[in-house]
Amino acid sequence: MPLKISVRSVLPSREAGDIIVVGTPLLGGGGRSKKNQRSTLDGFDRALGGALGRLIKKEEFKGKKDQQISLSTLGRVKADRLIVHGLGDVAKLTAGDVRTFAAKAARAANADKAKRLVLGIPEGLEDRLREIVEGLELGAYRFTKYLTGDRRPKAELAQVAICLVGEVPKDAKERIDAGQIVAAGVNLARDLSNEPPNVLYPDTLADAARNAAKDANIKVQVFDYKEIQKRGMKLLQAVGQGSEHKPAMVHLSYVPPNPKRRIAFVGKGITFDSGGLSIKPAAGMGEMKHDMSGAANVVGLMNVIGKLKPDVEVHGIVAAAENMPDGNSYRPGDVWGSLDGKSVEIINTDAEGRLILADALAYARSLEPDLLVDNATLTGACVVALGNSCSGWYANNEATAEEFAAAAKASGEQMWRLPLLEDLKDQLKSDSADLKHTGDRWGGSISAALFLREFIGNVPNWVHCDIAGPAMGDRIRGWDPKGGTGHGVLTFLALVDRASRAAAGAGAAPAPSVAKAGPPVEEGAAPIAKTAARKTKKASARKSAQPAGAKGGPKKSTAEGPRATKGADVGPDVGAREPQGRTKTSARKRR
């Protein structure tokens, strides 16, 4: 259930709740624009008999960023506990900083078994209500579905009173609503990632996508195993045929009137990765339920898109499978065809993610997107390079890279661009097929990206995100919880948001919903330029965008993708990480 959030201009010392958390800039005027402006701390020291002032002096609290003090009020104010959180220079706070502060406040409330939180916001942050609300909802998140008895939380945060020292913005309700919609999408991705693999498998992941589509009033198609075979998605078939739970493909689509751009997002949905015949070691295999986090991100993102209604056409493609050992499993040494038409030699069945993505990318390119983005918990090599809190990403041209980098910066999610080194492409040469699907251990994330690039056809702008590190948190970081994080959704939404603003035209009013409540567009961060040269190139690309095996050609409206055959489940118009060598390491590092 979403939090019940209210906002008004009042000192937090006058508001009642179970716990009060106030953010304060640098004390002594360092973070204030006026000498005599009101402070979130006003009224507390007097009510507490000077106890707050003494604690500030004792702890040498200066209001620096992330400094924190806490004290019991003993009933002298209208809450049992007061927490003062330093924000540093308010003018320098990023969207991520604001979101993290609010998330910490929500977590503190849950830890204190508080049902009502009073949150004090200093002057200068009135226009950051959306990020504040996102942080509250993301910080309050807990996956408790399967807890019973004493393990189940006795109390949960339900209400938040936001107290602004400054004036309440006229569009405060719209900002709050947008923040809650965005956070709900991220939390949906988290829920799907956290579900155990006996509950979430390809068919039930497809059901979750249907429910998300119905909730957001967008279109959905689901391709079952027979349809996958009919369409020639042979790599997806290969990975999933060894499981009792057969693979599925999901296509979610949002098509507004007269869209100026078309963006497609693709997600890897390995609902459980045992490694197949190249089986993983036991250590860490339980984490492989998170190997569908890329698909979860796409489902959560499309749920948000359908509700915020940007002026951009957006498609979400999910390739779902279970990678299991069986007499019918695909084998190292196999050669399989693909939707693209290329043949692929299988080297290691524990590098399955890039195989299902290959067919998903070939399908997505038939939609003729202006921008194609895939995300996957793809390689342990990326985790080795960037750690557990940062994703790696690749782009096939500089304009696309600039656009995606600006979106990542606006979202506050940690992402770092990695190079597509052409000399590593030789690692994918095969003696018996068009391609090998894995290369050497060294540079494993790069060779995986190079393999995926082979299946985008003539799509002019492509980004690949390897989210293997931050998709599953081993501890709390910022607004991310332990377990499934939904990392990537905020960046993808920022990408759509910026495209929607650009579609509204330079100097025009922001697009409804997304643009009105979204993060500001940075100057100079224009969308991909459509030059005369690109138009010529794109006209040529249209002729060859359809992958081999896809049924039906490109259409004026691509809301339902290439024509479905009888085996496709067309919804109503309701509006592993992979290994880099067989070293003896944990499954988490090898998927």
Image: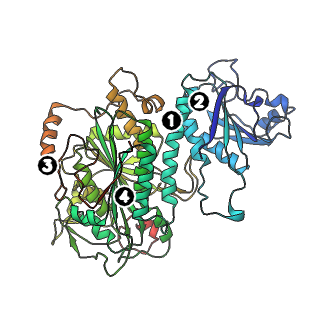
Q: Nearer the viewer, mark 4 or mark 1?
A: 1
Look at the picture and state if 189 lies above or below 527: below
Residue carrying label 2: 90
Q: Nearer the viewer, mark 4 or mark 2?
A: 4
Q: Quadrant of the C terminus?
A: bottom left
* Crowd around label 1: few <14 · some 14–19 · many ≥20 (10 Å): many
Residue 544's disc number: 3
> What count of labels does the image hold?
4
Query: Considering depth in this image, is 437 or 182 the residue closer to the camera?
Result: 182
Q: Mark 4 to mark 2: distance in Å?
A: 39 Å
Reading the chain from its start, which is encountered first: label 4 or label 2?
2
Q: Are marks 4 and 3 in contact (CB under 8 Å)?
A: no
- Residue that appears at 48% across and 57% down: 192
* Crowd around label 2: few <14 · some 14–19 · many ≥20 (10 Å): many
Look at the picture and state if 144 lies above or below 502: below
Residue 268's disc number: 4
Give, as a three-letter code, the residue at label 1: Ala
Whether residue 146 appears in this view of the structure is yes
Reading the chain from its start, which is encountered first: label 3 or label 1?
1
Q: Mark 4 to mark 1: distance in Å?
A: 27 Å
Give, as a three-letter code, the residue at label 2: Val
Query: Considering depth in this image, is 184 or 131 the residue closer to the camera?
Result: 184
Left or right of 504? Residue 68 is right
Q: Are marks 3 and 1 in contact (CB under 8 Å)?
A: no
Whether residue 284 appears in this view of the structure is no
Residue 178's disc number: 1
Query: Considering depth in this image, is 28 or 164 the residue closer to the camera?
Result: 164
Image location of residue 303, percent across then percent down: 44, 45
